Image (tube, rainbow, N blue to C red):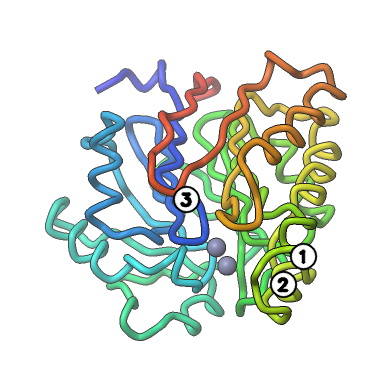
């Protein structure tokens, strides 16, 4: 067990994409999962693969009720209860809780209010509203000591609030969902294309790059993970190139690590030393 005075906040994107999302954020003393949209087996196997098998899971923060974010909730809650001997709370907005498919409803739902911070052990959690086509979706920032990490995916457009939250993060997981040309020229039915492009759908590379551009003024970002890439309507090279161009504009190439979340392969954790215990 590391000392309380020399903690490291670790952020590991375990799965990212339209088939399932899950990110671990923890500092060795406390930790949370943001979303649980791949199977419980996968979540635990991927944590083990990254040497996080014993990392604490004190809560699961659910962003919204789409199955690629909450599909494993019921089974995961049972498994965590067996593993830890206690009920691990699943935090979500009232709207999200009301929108859950009955088959995935976990034990121990704790409803939260977007905009109102709460504690998971010593971690401070800040849920904030994002525009997406579900009942009451949120993004999350999680703080250990003076360091914030956050996950912002599944939003149709950026907002001033989202920009502000991003600026505070040392580790940022941001949606780069689609390339507009690939989406429009692709095989998805028109209504699906419209939904993805709408202000309550998903961020395009252009929109995400704009958000990043705005957020990088006075930001604390050290690690950037591009997330929720569409398999059909984006390419890793396109998304990376857009983000890299923004980093270059801000003179941040080499200062900020830039990586892609993956659907099948867990990403080794981004690590930031925690100060101000
Ligand atoms: Zn999603
Ligand atoms: Zn969604």
Reading the image, the residue beneath label 1 is 184
Residue depicted at x 73% and y 79%:
190
Residue 13: where, in percent of width, then height? Answer: 45, 41
Q: Residue at x 65, y 69 (%)?
A: 187
**Which quadrant of the figure shows ligand 1?**
bottom right
Q: Quadrant of the N terminus?
A: top left
Toward the viewer: 14 or 195?
195
Task: Give the residue at x 31% y 82%.
Answer: 103
Residue annotated with mark 2: 193
Mark 1 or mark 2, which has the lower sequence index? 1
Q: Earlier in the sequence, mark 1 or mark 3?
A: 3
Check the image and report above or below for 14 versus 217.
below
* Camera-side residue of 207 and 6: 207
Judged from the image, the secondary structure of the residue bearing numbered disc 1 is helix
Whether residue 187 can be seen here = yes
* Few, some or many residues within 10 Å of mark 1 (<14, 14–19, 20+): some
Residue found 51% across the figure and 41% down from its top: 261
Name the residue carrying label 3.
119
Looking at the image, residue 265 lies above or below residue 112: above
Callout 2: SS = helix
Q: Are marks 1 and 2 in contact (CB under 8 Å)?
A: yes
Q: Splitting the image into 4 quarters, where does residue 189 fall?
A: bottom right
The answer to whether residue 126 of the structure is visible from this angle is: no
Nearer to us of marks 1 and 3 is 1
Q: Position of residue 196 (x, y in %)?
A: 70, 69
**What is the spatial separation of the Cα atoms under label 1 and label 2, in whole angstroms?**
7 Å
Query: Residue 207 vs residue 89: left or right?
Result: right
Position of 183 compared to 214: left or right? left
């Amino acid at each position: 067990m590391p000392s309380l005075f020399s903690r490291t906040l670790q952020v590991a994107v375990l799965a990212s994409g339209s088939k399932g999302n899950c990110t671990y954020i923890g500092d060795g003393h406390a930790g949370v999962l943001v979303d649980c949209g791949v199977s419980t087996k996968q979540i635990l196997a991927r944590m083990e693969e990254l040497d996080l098998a014993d990392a604490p899971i004190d809560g699961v923060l659910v962003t919204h009720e789409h199955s690629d974010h909450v599909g494993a909730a019921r089974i995961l809650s049972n498994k965590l209860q067996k593993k830890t001997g206690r009920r691990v709370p699943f935090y979500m907005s009232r709207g999200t809780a009301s929108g859950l498919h009955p088959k995935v409803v976990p034990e121990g739902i704790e409803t939260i209010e977007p905009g109102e911070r709460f504690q998971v052990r010593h971690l401070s959690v800040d849920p904030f509203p994002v525009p997406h086509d579900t009942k009451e979706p949120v993004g999350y920032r999680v703080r250990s000591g003076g360091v914030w990490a956050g996950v912002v995916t599944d939003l149709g457009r950026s907002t001033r609030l989202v920009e502000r939250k991003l600026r505070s993060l040392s580790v940022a997981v941001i949606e780069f969902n689609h390339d507009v040309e690939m989406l429009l020229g692709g095989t998805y039915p028109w209504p699906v294309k419209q939904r993805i492009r709408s202000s309550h759908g998903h961020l395009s590379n252009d929109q995400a790059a704009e958000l990043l551009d705005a957020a990088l003024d006075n930001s604390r970002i050290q690690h950037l993970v591009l997330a929720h890439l569409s398999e059909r309507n984006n390419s890793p090279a396109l998304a990376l190139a857009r983000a890299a161009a923004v980093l270059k504009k801000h003179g941040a190439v080499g200062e900020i690590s830039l990586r892609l979340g993956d659907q099948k392969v867990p990403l080794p954790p981004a690590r930031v030393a925690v100060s101000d215990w």
